[in-house]
Image (cartoon, rainbow, N blue to C red):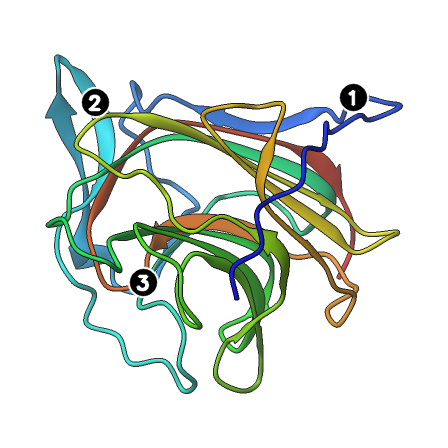
Amino acid sequence: MIVAAAVLICVQTEELPVVFETDFRDRSLAGWTFTDPSAWRIEEEEGRPVLAQFAPSRYEPKVRSPLNRALLPTPPLGDLELEVEVRSTARDYGHRDVCLFLGYQDAEHFYYVHLAKEADDHANSIFLVNGAPRVSIAESRTSGTAWDDGWHRVRVVRTISDGMIRVYFDAMDRPVMTARDSTLRGPGRVGVGTFDDTAQFRRIRVRGRSVEP
Protein backbone atom coordinates (compact mmCIF):
# COMPACT_ATOMS: atom_id res chain seq x y z
CA MET A 1 0.00 0.00 0.00
CA ILE A 2 1.31 3.46 -0.88
CA VAL A 3 1.42 5.86 2.03
CA ALA A 4 1.29 9.57 1.28
CA ALA A 5 4.44 11.37 2.30
CA ALA A 6 4.05 13.28 5.53
CA VAL A 7 4.48 17.04 5.63
CA LEU A 8 7.90 17.50 7.16
CA ILE A 9 10.36 20.33 6.95
CA CYS A 10 14.05 19.49 7.04
CA VAL A 11 15.56 21.62 9.78
CA GLN A 12 19.25 21.40 10.60
CA THR A 13 20.86 23.10 13.56
CA GLU A 14 24.08 23.57 11.59
CA GLU A 15 24.49 23.91 7.85
CA LEU A 16 26.73 21.28 6.35
CA PRO A 17 29.73 22.52 4.35
CA VAL A 18 29.79 22.17 0.57
CA VAL A 19 32.19 19.35 -0.36
CA PHE A 20 31.45 19.19 -4.10
CA GLU A 21 29.66 21.33 -6.66
CA THR A 22 29.60 21.35 -10.44
CA ASP A 23 27.61 22.68 -13.37
CA PHE A 24 29.88 20.77 -15.80
CA ARG A 25 31.13 23.94 -17.48
CA ASP A 26 34.69 22.69 -16.99
CA ARG A 27 33.63 19.42 -18.68
CA SER A 28 35.74 17.49 -16.20
CA LEU A 29 34.76 14.06 -14.93
CA ALA A 30 38.04 13.49 -13.09
CA GLY A 31 37.57 11.28 -10.05
CA TRP A 32 34.12 10.02 -11.06
CA THR A 33 33.46 6.26 -10.92
CA PHE A 34 31.08 4.67 -13.43
CA THR A 35 29.69 1.17 -13.77
CA ASP A 36 30.24 1.72 -17.50
CA PRO A 37 32.10 4.90 -18.57
CA SER A 38 31.03 4.40 -22.20
CA ALA A 39 27.39 5.07 -21.25
CA TRP A 40 28.17 8.60 -20.02
CA ARG A 41 29.36 11.78 -21.70
CA ILE A 42 29.14 15.57 -21.57
CA GLU A 43 26.48 16.89 -23.97
CA GLU A 44 25.12 20.31 -24.90
CA GLU A 45 21.53 20.94 -23.81
CA GLU A 46 19.88 24.35 -24.23
CA GLY A 47 23.29 25.91 -24.81
CA ARG A 48 25.00 24.56 -21.70
CA PRO A 49 26.94 21.40 -20.86
CA VAL A 50 25.20 18.57 -19.01
CA LEU A 51 26.23 15.14 -17.83
CA ALA A 52 24.28 12.61 -19.88
CA GLN A 53 23.77 8.93 -19.21
CA PHE A 54 22.73 8.39 -22.81
CA ALA A 55 22.93 4.60 -23.19
CA PRO A 56 22.44 1.46 -21.10
CA SER A 57 25.49 0.44 -19.09
CA ARG A 58 27.18 -2.80 -19.94
CA TYR A 59 27.16 -3.93 -16.35
CA GLU A 60 25.68 -6.89 -14.54
CA PRO A 61 25.35 -6.41 -10.77
CA LYS A 62 25.85 -9.43 -8.54
CA VAL A 63 22.53 -8.66 -6.85
CA ARG A 64 19.44 -7.00 -8.32
CA SER A 65 20.13 -3.26 -8.21
CA PRO A 66 20.51 -0.26 -10.56
CA LEU A 67 22.72 -0.77 -13.61
CA ASN A 68 23.66 2.83 -14.35
CA ARG A 69 25.73 4.35 -11.55
CA ALA A 70 28.02 7.38 -11.51
CA LEU A 71 29.72 7.99 -8.16
CA LEU A 72 30.85 11.52 -7.50
CA PRO A 73 34.48 12.40 -6.67
CA THR A 74 33.80 12.96 -2.97
CA PRO A 75 35.16 11.17 0.09
CA PRO A 76 32.85 8.92 2.12
CA LEU A 77 30.26 11.11 3.84
CA GLY A 78 28.22 10.72 7.00
CA ASP A 79 25.45 13.33 7.28
CA LEU A 80 24.83 14.76 3.82
CA GLU A 81 22.63 16.68 1.42
CA LEU A 82 22.74 15.75 -2.26
CA GLU A 83 20.98 18.18 -4.57
CA VAL A 84 20.68 17.77 -8.35
CA GLU A 85 18.96 19.32 -11.32
CA VAL A 86 17.92 16.39 -13.48
CA ARG A 87 15.91 15.59 -16.59
CA SER A 88 14.59 12.15 -17.47
CA THR A 89 15.29 11.36 -21.13
CA ALA A 90 13.60 7.95 -21.15
CA ARG A 91 10.34 6.99 -22.79
CA ASP A 92 7.24 7.59 -20.71
CA TYR A 93 6.12 4.42 -18.90
CA GLY A 94 5.40 3.25 -15.37
CA HIS A 95 8.99 2.62 -14.30
CA ARG A 96 10.49 5.72 -15.96
CA ASP A 97 13.14 6.52 -13.37
CA VAL A 98 16.09 8.43 -12.03
CA CYS A 99 18.23 7.09 -9.15
CA LEU A 100 20.32 8.84 -6.52
CA PHE A 101 22.84 6.86 -4.45
CA LEU A 102 24.02 7.43 -0.89
CA GLY A 103 25.89 5.55 1.79
CA TYR A 104 27.64 3.69 -1.05
CA GLN A 105 30.22 1.38 0.56
CA ASP A 106 30.75 -1.01 -2.32
CA ALA A 107 28.86 -2.48 -5.28
CA GLU A 108 26.65 -4.65 -3.04
CA HIS A 109 26.16 -2.34 -0.03
CA PHE A 110 24.42 1.02 -0.44
CA TYR A 111 21.15 2.93 -0.32
CA TYR A 112 19.45 4.43 -3.33
CA VAL A 113 16.41 6.55 -4.11
CA HIS A 114 14.32 5.37 -7.05
CA LEU A 115 12.10 8.13 -8.41
CA ALA A 116 9.67 6.45 -10.82
CA LYS A 117 6.52 7.51 -12.65
CA GLU A 118 4.41 4.93 -10.80
CA ALA A 119 4.99 3.30 -7.41
CA ASP A 120 4.91 -0.41 -6.71
CA ASP A 121 6.98 -2.93 -4.74
CA HIS A 122 10.05 -2.20 -6.87
CA ALA A 123 9.57 1.41 -7.94
CA ASN A 124 9.38 4.93 -6.53
CA SER A 125 10.83 4.18 -3.14
CA ILE A 126 13.99 4.23 -1.02
CA PHE A 127 15.91 0.98 -1.27
CA LEU A 128 18.60 -0.87 0.65
CA VAL A 129 21.12 -3.09 -1.11
CA ASN A 130 22.86 -5.17 1.54
CA GLY A 131 24.54 -8.08 -0.20
CA ALA A 132 21.16 -9.18 -1.56
CA PRO A 133 18.58 -7.91 -4.08
CA ARG A 134 17.28 -4.44 -3.24
CA VAL A 135 14.58 -4.08 -0.60
CA SER A 136 12.20 -1.14 -0.20
CA ILE A 137 12.62 0.58 3.18
CA ALA A 138 10.41 3.66 2.70
CA GLU A 139 8.16 4.65 5.61
CA SER A 140 6.27 7.10 3.42
CA ARG A 141 6.17 7.77 -0.29
CA THR A 142 3.86 9.09 -2.98
CA SER A 143 2.03 7.13 -5.65
CA GLY A 144 4.53 8.28 -8.28
CA THR A 145 6.97 10.94 -9.48
CA ALA A 146 5.72 13.40 -12.09
CA TRP A 147 8.38 12.87 -14.73
CA ASP A 148 7.99 14.78 -17.97
CA ASP A 149 10.59 16.09 -20.42
CA GLY A 150 11.51 19.10 -18.28
CA TRP A 151 14.16 19.75 -15.64
CA HIS A 152 13.47 19.04 -11.97
CA ARG A 153 15.21 19.72 -8.69
CA VAL A 154 15.77 16.79 -6.34
CA ARG A 155 17.33 16.77 -2.87
CA VAL A 156 18.23 13.84 -0.63
CA VAL A 157 19.09 14.39 3.03
CA ARG A 158 20.62 11.73 5.27
CA THR A 159 21.41 11.91 8.97
CA ILE A 160 23.47 9.07 10.41
CA SER A 161 22.47 9.46 14.05
CA ASP A 162 18.80 8.60 13.54
CA GLY A 163 19.06 6.76 10.22
CA MET A 164 16.70 9.20 8.51
CA ILE A 165 16.62 9.64 4.75
CA ARG A 166 14.38 12.35 3.26
CA VAL A 167 13.75 12.95 -0.42
CA TYR A 168 12.41 16.16 -1.96
CA PHE A 169 11.17 16.68 -5.52
CA ASP A 170 10.75 20.29 -6.74
CA ALA A 171 9.10 21.46 -3.47
CA MET A 172 11.86 21.65 -0.87
CA ASP A 173 9.57 21.98 2.15
CA ARG A 174 7.72 18.67 1.72
CA PRO A 175 9.48 15.30 1.39
CA VAL A 176 8.00 12.92 -1.15
CA MET A 177 9.70 9.94 0.54
CA THR A 178 11.11 9.15 3.95
CA ALA A 179 12.89 6.18 5.46
CA ARG A 180 14.58 5.35 8.73
CA ASP A 181 17.24 2.65 8.53
CA SER A 182 20.59 2.07 10.21
CA THR A 183 21.60 -1.19 8.55
CA LEU A 184 24.53 0.57 6.87
CA ARG A 185 25.58 2.88 9.67
CA GLY A 186 28.90 3.88 8.18
CA PRO A 187 29.68 6.65 5.73
CA GLY A 188 29.67 6.19 1.98
CA ARG A 189 29.92 7.88 -1.38
CA VAL A 190 27.06 9.49 -3.27
CA GLY A 191 26.07 9.22 -6.90
CA VAL A 192 23.54 9.67 -9.67
CA GLY A 193 22.11 7.48 -12.42
CA THR A 194 19.11 5.38 -13.39
CA PHE A 195 18.00 1.82 -12.89
CA ASP A 196 17.75 0.95 -16.59
CA ASP A 197 16.71 4.22 -18.26
CA THR A 198 18.55 7.39 -19.34
CA ALA A 199 18.85 10.91 -17.88
CA GLN A 200 20.75 14.19 -17.91
CA PHE A 201 22.20 16.11 -14.96
CA ARG A 202 23.09 19.80 -15.28
CA ARG A 203 23.96 20.85 -11.72
CA ILE A 204 25.02 18.87 -8.66
CA ARG A 205 25.85 20.10 -5.16
CA VAL A 206 26.84 17.98 -2.17
CA ARG A 207 26.99 19.14 1.42
CA GLY A 208 28.38 16.88 4.10
CA ARG A 209 31.28 15.90 6.29
CA SER A 210 33.92 13.45 5.21
CA VAL A 211 34.30 10.48 7.51
CA GLU A 212 36.82 7.66 7.33
CA PRO A 213 34.99 4.42 6.43
Mark 1–mark 2 CB contact (< 8 Å): no
Could you say where residue 61 lies in the image, as x and y percent from the top left? 36, 80
Mark sitting on residue 15 = 1
Which residue is at 19% across, 50% downward? 198
Q: Label 3, on which residue?
A: 195
Mark 3 burial class by Cα count in 10 Å: few <14, some 14-19, many 20+: many
Eyeballing the image, is 79 above or below 180? above
In the image, 114 versus 171, the foreground residue is 171
Q: Label 2, on which residue?
A: 49
Q: Quadrant of residue 130?
A: bottom right
Viewport quadrant of the C terminus: bottom right
Amino acid type indicated by mark 2 = Pro
The numbered mark, 1 or 3, whose residue comes first in the sequence reads 1
Of discs 3 and 2, which sits in the foreground? 3
Disc 3 versus disc 2: distance between alpha carbons? Answer: 23 Å
Disc 1 versus disc 3: distance between alpha carbons? Answer: 31 Å
Amino acid type indicated by mark 3 = Phe
Furthest residue toward top:
47
